[in-house]
């Protein structure tokens, strides 16, 4: 069992967006890959849980960046579990360049659900989780609930298609981010950099469902959401600099 994992990553050209920076989708993808690889190595990853009819579900994540990795550059992510309750586990991430210079950090909240009932299970039934806890925080707040505004600037309809789905047959975590970034006004993306963002995943979305993607921007803060009728499925708060 390894309490902390430090994993290497590379920024490919397809990871860069139109502002010539690593996109938030690519960054979150790397962070989630680090979480998956660390859990797999310790014996409680998705593959091991699937064999028991269980799977991990990401409920919230917050990220703050001082500097983004550049195109064709390497970076490393160090990840560990900070604490674990009955239903929620907190996993942290530190992002650095190969020389050890700090780039940013992230904090995420995870649950394990029964794949058939879709109900959360008690994490005490996975004792391996508690063997690798490292009581070390990161310099950002734990992700909080994001309240979406009643009045919004834009709403775009989207029907869930094949390319939106992951192996659990529901919408992939980074697809929600992609949908929401697509409704952010282009001048904001071109003129500003994402200082930090927080994402809440509230409900699953499946193939063929139709959702509304919305955004509201005020000064250096954008709130985005994915809704089906009045039900909020996912929400994101972006702080710009």
Image (spheres, grey):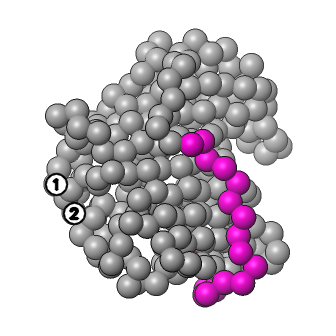
Q: Residue at x 69, y 37 (%)?
A: 111
Name the quadrant containing residue 76: top left
Q: Position of residue 72 (x, y in %)?
A: 16, 54
Disc marking residue 52: none
Q: Is residue 51 visible?
A: no
Name the quadrant containing residue 121: top right
Q: Secondary structure at mark 1?
A: loop
Of the 4 image quadrants, the one containing the C terminus is bottom left
Label 2 CA crowd tier, 10 Å (few <14, some 14–19, many 20+)? some
Q: Nearer the viewer, residue 81 or 49?
A: 81
Q: Report the side of 11 relative to 91 (left or right).
A: left
Q: Position of residue 129 (x, y in %)?
A: 61, 20
Label 1 CA crowd tier, 10 Å (few <14, some 14–19, many 20+)? few
Q: Is residue 82 visible?
A: yes
Q: Which contiguous range is marked in magenta?
A: 141-162
Q: Position of residue 132 (x, y in %)?
A: 53, 16
In this figure, which residue is indicated by the disc labeled 2?
Answer: 13
In the image, is residue 227 above or below residue 30? Answer: below
Q: Report the side of 149 relative to 130 (left or right).
A: right
In the image, is residue 29 above or below residue 135? Answer: below
Q: Residue at x 66, y 25 (%)?
A: 84
């Amino acid at each position: 069992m390894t309490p902390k994992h430090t994993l290497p990553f590379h920024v490919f050209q397809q990871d860069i967006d139109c502002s010539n920076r690593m996109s938030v989708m690519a960054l979150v993808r790397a962070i989630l890959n680090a979480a998956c690889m660390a859990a797999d190595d310790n014996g409680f990853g998705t593959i091991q849980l699937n064999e028991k009819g269980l799977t991990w579900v990401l409920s919230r994540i917050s990220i703050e960046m001082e500097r983004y990795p550049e195109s064709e550059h390497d970076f490393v992510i160090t990840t560990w579990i900070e604490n674990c309750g009955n239903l929620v586990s907190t996993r942290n991430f530190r992002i650095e360049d190969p020389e050890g210079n700090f780039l940013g950090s992230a904090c995420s909240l995870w649950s394990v659900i029964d794949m058939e009932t879709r109900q959360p299970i008690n994490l005490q039934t996975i004792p391996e989780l508690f063997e690798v806890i490292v009581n070390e925080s990161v310099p950002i707040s734990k992700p909080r609930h994001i309240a979406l505004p009643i009045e919004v600037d834009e709403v775009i309809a989207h029907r869930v298609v094949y390319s939106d789905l992951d192996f659990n047959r529901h919408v992939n975590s980074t697809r929600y981010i992609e949908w929401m970034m697509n409704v952010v006004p282009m001048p904001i993306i071109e003129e500003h950099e994402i200082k930090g963002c927080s994402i809440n995943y509230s409900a699953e979305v499946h193939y063929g469902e139709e959702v509304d993607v919305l955004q509201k921007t005020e000064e250096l803060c954008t709130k985005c959401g994915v809704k089906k009728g009045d039900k909020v499925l996912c929400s994101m708060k972006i702080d710009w600099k």
